[in-house]
Amino acid sequence: MTGQKPPHESRGDNGSDPPPDTGMGMTAVSYLIAGIIVWGGIGWLVDHYAGTEGIFAGIGAVLGVAGGVYLIVRRLGA
């Protein structure tokens, strides 16, 4: 059966739109990175005004990771 093409599989749409789950991995990574940056930055500001050296920045970064994981589980259902 040389020269025959396989049958065209219909996806039910016009084929120009990406699948609905495209980008979920990047969304999850961005939640984690944004949480670390935002809450670590808030912790750094607290450190700056309280006169401590990195304690609240570390706590903020850990809280940011926890918040990012929470958002991933809540919004993406992972």
Image (cartoon, rainbow, N blue to C red):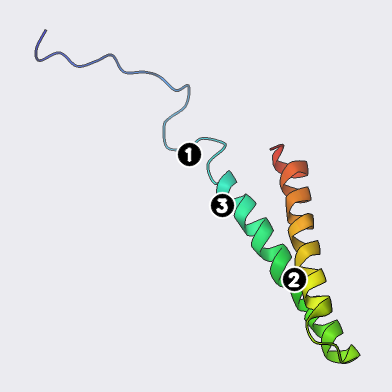
Q: Residue furthest right?
A: 50
Q: In the drawing, what numbered circle is on residue 26?
A: 3
Q: Which residue is mark 2?
A: 38
Query: Is disc 3 placed on a helix, strand or loop?
Result: helix
Query: Helix, strand, or loop for circle 1?
Result: loop
Q: Earlier in the sequence, mark 3 or mark 1?
A: 1
The picture places residue 76, in percent across and down from the top left corner, at 69, 41
Image quadrant holding the N terminus, namely top left
**x%, y% of residue 53?**
80, 87
Q: Residue at x 90, y 89 (%)?
A: 50
Q: At label 3, which amino acid type do we have?
A: Met
Mark in front: 1 vs 2: 2
- CA–CA distance between discs 1 and 2? 31 Å
The location of residue 66, given as percent across then percent down, is 78, 56
Q: Check disc 1 and report the residue beneath it.
A: 18
Amino acid on which disc 1 is placed: Pro
Residue at the (47%, 38%) spot, across then down = 17
Determine the CA span between mark 3 and mark 1: 15 Å
Relative height, residue 6 to residue 22 (above, below): above
